[in-house]
Amino acid sequence: MSPRPRDPLAAVAPVFAALGDRTRLSLLSRLADGRPRSIVQLTQGTGLTRQGVSKHLAILKEARLVRNERCGRESRYVLQPDALMEARQYLERASQQWDDAVERLRRFVEE
């Protein structure tokens, strides 16, 4: 596991990159109930191969959005909400900065 970057952008950029794919969003949605699922379970109904799903899961794991647990010979994947919460907090800060900038502009224009 790589150390967490101190730069907030470096911490959330992989999350946003991973979320920018419909298949990965679908996989996260299937894991949102908190139940661990195997690659076989996650592949069902997607039209993708296990290898394809594995590649998407590797990207999600690198972005700290999922983790895998060994269960016998099988790997099961579980949603890790911490990275999503960090991304949400980043968006809230960015939103506040934009709101502040718009308010400053409004005051400037009205003067």
Image: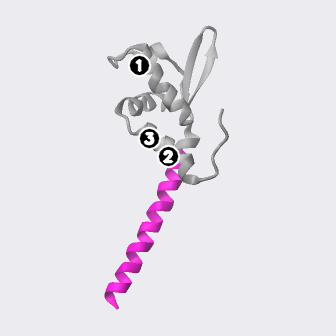
Q: Which amino acid does label 1 sit on?
A: Gly
Q: How has the structure been colored for display? A: one colour
Q: Which residue is drawn at 55% across and 27% down?
A: 78
SS label for mark 1: helix
Task: Identify which residue, 59 or 103, lies in the foreground.
Answer: 59
Quick one: label 2, few (<14), some, or many (20+) residues within 10 Å? few
- Identified at 57% across, 16% down, the residue is 75
> Residue sitting at 45 percent across and 26 percent down?
56
Circle 2: residue type? Ala
Which type of secondary structure does the marked residue at label 2 adopt? helix
Specify the quadrant of the image occupied by residue 24.
top left
Decide: is 60 above or below 92. Answer: above
User: Total number of numbered labels?
Assistant: 3
Kindly identify which residue carries mark 3: 17
**C-beta proximity under 8 Å, tags 2 and 3:** yes
Q: Work out which quarter of the rendered image holds the N terminus and state it.
A: top right
Q: Where is residue 64 in the image (x, y as percent from the top left)?
A: 57, 36
The answer for how far apart the CA atoms under marks 3 and 1 are is 17 Å
Magenta: main secondary structure: helix
- Location of residue 34 (image quadrant): top right
Neighbourhood count class around disc 1 (C-alpha, 10 Å): few under 14, some 14–19, many 20 upward = some
Q: Which residue lies furthest to the bottom in this view?
A: 111
| Residue matched to label 2 | 13
Comes first in the chain, label 3 or label 1: 3
| Span of residues in magenta | 85-111
